[in-house]
Image (spheres, rainbow, N blue to C red):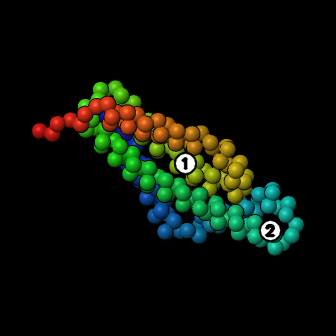
Amino acid sequence: MTQRIPYVIAILTLIGGVFISIIFGANEDYFKDKINEGLKKNEKVNLIQDPEEKAAVLKTEADKNWRYYQRFHFHATGIGAMIMGVLLFISFLSAPERIKAITSFAVSIGGFLYPFIWLFAAIYGPEMGREAAKEKFAVFGYMGGLFLVGLILSLYMALKYRLKELK
């Protein structure tokens, strides 16, 4: 069962990325409306007195926050595919099971959690500011480091251990 968990996590990563794209397709305006509602509550934006400058900032911020939703989709689907590829590659190595398990969990957990920094920055960024939202949810960004550690361990195993002989 434990050997299957990283594969399940990889599939969940893919499902998350595809699911949000389906939601975008079904109701993109909902997300854009939520962004605009949040921007109306943003203290820094509300301090801008010049109407033209305020309109320009609102448009720029709305576009960037919308891009964060898209980044969640792109990262989740792309990294999910990478996770699956790395897990399959690792399964063919003749490395000890313990290092394969550690690597599999690092790649899958790190890859699964990393895209959430973009989702939470998109949800909370309009009201609290994009940078503040990314800082608040930075732990998810750090998970990209765990993913990288797993990739480096995969490289180490690829260089040290042979591929299993196919029968």
Quadrant where the N terminus sits is top left
Residue 34, can we see it? no
Q: Relative to 33, say whether 4 is above or below.
A: above
The foreground one among 96 and 113 is 96
Q: Relative to 96, say whether 149 is above or below.
A: below
The foreground one among 136 and 56 is 56
Q: Residue furthest left?
A: 167
The image position of residue 71, as x and y in percent, is: 54, 57
**Identity of the residue drawn at 47% across and 62% down:** 21
Task: Please name the residue that numbered disc 2 is placed on.
Answer: 54
Q: Residue furthest front?
A: 159
Q: Relative to 164, say whether 22 is above or below.
A: below
Type of the residue with mark 1: Phe
Type of the residue with mark 2: Lys
The image position of residue 159, as x and y in percent, is: 33, 34
**Identity of the residue drawn at 35% across and 46% down:** 84
Say which element carries label 1.
helix
Q: Are marks 2 and 1 in contact (CB under 8 Å)?
A: no
Say which element carries label 2.
helix
**Identity of the residue drawn at 84% across and 72% down:** 51
Q: Give the quarter of the image for residue 167.
A: top left
Q: Relative to 144, say whether 56 is above or below.
A: below
Residue 159, can we see it? yes
Q: Residue furthest right?
A: 49
Task: Please name the residue that numbered disc 1 is placed on.
Answer: 116
Q: Give the quarter of the image for residue 66.
A: bottom right
Q: Residue furthest bottom?
A: 52
Report crowding for label 2: few under 14, some 14 to 19, many 20 or more residues within 10 A (C-alpha).
some
Q: Which callout, 2 or 1, points at the residue further toward the start of the chain?
A: 2
Q: Is residue 43 left or right of residue 123?
A: right
- The Cα atoms of the two marked residues, 2 and 1, are separated by 29 Å
